[in-house]
Amino acid sequence: PPMPESSPTIPTGIYAIPPTPFLETGAVDEQSLAKCLDFVVAAGGHGIVTPVNASEAIVLTDAERQQVTSVTVSHVAGRIPVVIGVSGVSTEASVLYAGFARDAGADAVIAMPPYVKHAPAGEIFAFYEAVARAADPLPVWIQDYVAPIGTPMPAELIVRMLGEIPGVHHVKEETAYAPQVMTAIREKAGDRVQGMMGGMAGRYLLEEYRRGATGSMPACEVTDVHVQVWEALAREDHVRARELHT
């Protein structure tokens, strides 16, 4: 399908994930983080996502997560959208992170269900309700990711949350059959899903695009190339996109 028109509610393109760099002392290296952020912007990245799986989120202290959030939002300074990861060990932790992200000036938040004690469907629904309330008025991305960190969710549950929880509009899909799950979500959710992206280093980006993905959230090492692949797809140059991707 043609690339959707960019709008405040339909994020499109490559939303890259910077690492969290550290000094030898173990402290967050803010200067190196700023360089990574500048690289993403200079490479034509359409957005930034952090701290999440590819940015060491699960090993950061709460203070470090807030530090990464503050540095990212302030240094990007509105040049491109910033999506802040708020996954945590409990609903309470994610609510804390979501509120901080909102107050720091993030453009959206993204969350997996709690990643230590995996929750059943009813608790997952309540989790996203709580995150959406804490992040309000920011939009919330549902991150559907594989175990052991992620909790793969049925497409039906994701569709229900998109339709019934105010503020939950977007999906990052990166389970084992991500393209097929995207098709199922798109068919069942329709316009209720306002943005749907893959991950996994853009491994399935070509297939995901054909199934209605609006972009991808890969780690940032090759943002310059990921952007070129996306731009080739956007102009329907599938031969060039395949060459670059390969």
Image (cartoon, grey):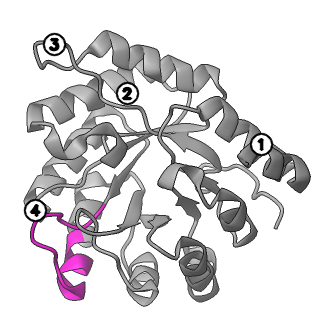
Q: Earlier in the sequence, mark 2 or mark 1?
A: 2
Q: How far is the residue under mark 2 from the one under mark 3?
A: 24 Å
Q: Earlier in the sequence, mark 2 or mark 3?
A: 3
Q: Is 4 rendered above or below residue 25?
A: below
Q: Earlier in the sequence, mark 1 or mark 3?
A: 3
Residue furthest to the front in view is 246
Q: Residue type at mark 2?
A: Val
Q: Which mark is residue 244?
A: 1
Q: How many marks?
A: 4
Q: Which mark is residue 196?
A: none
Q: Which residue is mark 3?
A: 24
Q: Residue type at mark 3?
A: Glu
Residue at the spot x=58%, y=33% of the render? 222
Residue 32 falls in image quadrant: top left
| Marks 1, 4: nearer the viewer | 1
| Magenta part of the chain | 112-127
Q: Residue type at mark 1?
A: Leu
